[in-house]
Amino acid sequence: MESNKRISDVREYFDVNYSYVAIGSISDEVILDYLSNGWVLNVPFERKMDLLYDYILSQGLTDVSE
């Protein structure tokens, strides 16, 4: 249940703050795997989202519209 809440929070944050990133095309598993990395665990939520954003773009995981 907690992972569903986490995914929901992530997707909502991206919809509000990074609406130009098509995060809906990225699987929950990819997001949760990234967020479980040691260097991501102990940072504030907003910073986690910045790191996830950088990861998504650097790996070309989804489309970005301008």
Image (spheres, rainbow, N blue to C red):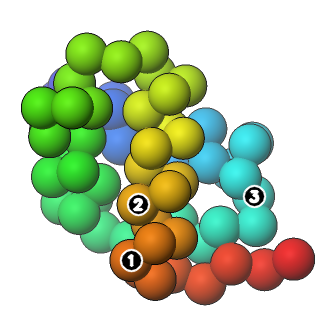
In the picture, the quarter occupied by the C terminus is bottom right
Residue 61, image x and y in percent?
42, 79
Tell me whether circle 1 and circle 3 mark residues in contact (CB < 8 Å).
no
Q: Residues within 10 Å of mark 2 (few under 14, many from 20)?
A: some
Residue 59 is marked as: 1
Residue 43 is marked as: none
Please tell me whether mark 3 sits on a helix, a strand or a loop. Answer: loop
Q: Nearer the viewer, residue 49 or 4?
A: 49
47 versus 36 height, above or below: above
Q: Residues within 10 Å of mark 3 (few under 14, many from 20)?
A: some
Tell me whether circle 2 and circle 1 mark residues in contact (CB < 8 Å).
yes
Gap between marks 2 and 1 measured at Cα: 6 Å
Residue 51, image x and y in percent?
45, 44
Gap between marks 1 and 3 measured at Cα: 18 Å
Based on the displayed image, in which of its 4 quarters is residue 2 positioned?
Answer: top left
Residue 19 located left or right of residue 5: right
Residue 33 located left or right of residue 22: left
Determine the residue positioned at 55% across, 25% down. Answer: 46
Which one is earlier in the sequence, the residue at label 2 or at label 3? 3
Amino acid, disc 2: Tyr
Residue wearing tag 3 = 19
39 versus 56 height, above or below: above
Does residue 12 appear in this view? no
Determine the residue positioned at 71% across, 53% down. Answer: 18
Determine the residue positioned at 51% across, 48% down. Answer: 11
Residue 19, image x and y in percent?
75, 58
17 versus 55 height, above or below: above
Which one is earlier in the sequence, the residue at label 1 or at label 3? 3
Amino acid, disc 1: Gln
Gap between marks 2 and 3 measured at Cα: 16 Å
